[in-house]
Image (spheres, rainbow, N blue to C red):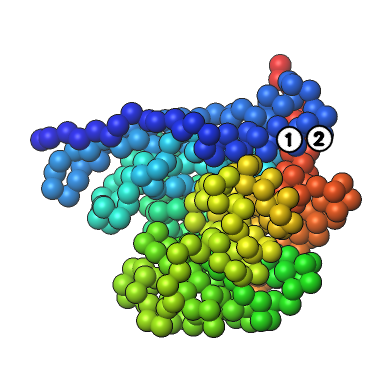
Amino acid sequence: MTTMTQPADQQVAGGPLNDAQTQLREATTILGYDDGLHAMLAAPRREVTVSIPLRRDDSRIELLTGHRVQHSLTRGPAKGGLRYSPDVNLDEVRALAMWMTWKCALLDVPYGGAKGGIRIDPRQYSQAELERVTRRYTSEISPLIGPERDIPAPDIGTDENTMAWLMDTYSAQQGHTVLGVTTGKPVSLGGSRGRATATSRGVVQVALAALRSRGIDPAGATAAVQGFGKVGRYAARFLAEAGVRVAAVSDQYGTTAASAGLPIPAVEEHVDATGSVVGFACGDQVDDLLTLDVDLLVVAAVEGVLHAGNAAEVRAQVIVEGANGPTTPEADVILQDAGRLVVPDILANAGGVIVSYFEWVQANQAYWWSAAEVEAQLADRMTSAWERVSEHAARLDLPLRTAATCLAVERVAQAHLLRGLYP
Ligand code: GLU
């Protein structure tokens, strides 16, 4: 038996946690909160790091590292995705957990915020290995999770199979089936209709509203979409269905573009066949999708892609954050000064956690809604959140992110103050 270990956790200077803390500091300053309240809002409530020994298919043992961070439990159970990526580290998970708290508060779903991650490149592992990793991680964090405690969901590198294994492992430990311990499960196993496309539906709904707010008619507008995973793929599809000309899409391997508009269903077929958007026939050459001359840029990949080094080159009037944390605070200032409209992650990509909430409600009640019901209720919540944030931003002359963060942080702070301190 040989043993392989990963390098020790590396904390990133700057990075997503710094960005999340900068955004929170700005909000608590505007809200006039004292240092004590700020500190309560800034610190994770609980965090756990676990070792995950994996027996690989060739019998070698490899030791992986996983985290679960519960940033807040103040408004309800913690809620947030589980990420499998070689870039996962504790500070990234802390930032993502904090953003979940603000997202749930902004959309008024009765949850705190959490995030989990395992530092692993899932493409290098078989399905059987990923199942063993998921089961061991679930077992290690099981004292912390549950329908009333903390409810994981898919994120980068995980999917409905991951959630089925997680649910099964937790249920086996409890001795009965507990559907409400995760969301994003397969529809045939207690998942919700409409969950798989929910984030993208919400992204496109606010993107169309944002274009109209700028006097741009979506029919005939142009767009570029960074990321072709769970969010970007359906965002591109729904944008095209709404009449937007999707001129470029990208994934981690490269970009495919056509200034006349890409035939998205054909691109999807190409991705299903080859695993990437690269090599799609009839594509133009594009150096940098982020700086294309389009009306709308949807960033649906990872954190920190719009930064001080490239924000000034962005030409899209409207930027919509399908990913969590794609714009650094320095880039926000540059984009704001250039008159760009940035629709922030905690609003733009909230469709996923909204339908996760619907899934949890359905699982807890063992009563299932139709796809039409899910989509109508999702659309209602996205519309009212968009209107509330836009009005608040206009009234106080704030960027949308600052307005959204203030509204969310205020809601969490009010819950803290009403509950009081124990003891
Ligand atoms: N991972 C998604 C997000 O970042 C969904 C979280 C959830 O549904 O709990 O919002």
Q: Residue at x 19, y 46 (%)?
A: 56
Image quadrant containing the C terminus? top right
Q: Residue at x 80, y 56 (%)?
A: 390
Q: Residues within 10 Å of mark 1 (few under 14, many from 20)?
A: some
Where 231 sits versus 269, above or below?
Answer: above
Cβ–Cβ under 8 Å for marks 1 and 2: yes
Mark identifier at residue 146:
none
Disc 2 is placed on an element classified as helix
Image quadrant containing the N terminus? top left
- Of residues 44 and 263, the one nearer the viewer is 263
Q: Where does the image place residue 216, in percent across and percent down from the top left?
A: 74, 73
Outermost residue toward the left in this view: 1
Q: Residue at x 63, y 63 (%)?
A: 315
Amino acid type for the residue under numbered disc 1 = Glu
Mark identifier at residue 26:
1
Where 296 sits versus 149, above or below?
Answer: below
Q: Where does the image place residue 227, in percent across and percent down from the top left?
A: 48, 62
- Of residues 379 and 214, the one nearer the viewer is 214
- Of residues 360 and 381, the one nearer the viewer is 381
Where 219 sits versus 417, above or below?
Answer: below
Is residue 237 visible to us here? no
Report whether 220 appears left or right of 390: left
Amino acid type for the residue under numbered disc 2 = Ile
Q: Where does the image place residue 323, in percent across and percent down from the top left?
A: 55, 54
| Label 2 CB less than 8 angstroms from ligand 1 | no
Q: Residue at x 47, y 74 (%)?
A: 257
Write down the quadrant of residue 221 in the picture.
bottom right
Report whether 108 appears left or right of 313: right
Q: Residues within 10 Å of mark 2 (few under 14, many from 20)?
A: few
Report whether 377 appears left or right of 141: right
Disc 2: which residue: 30
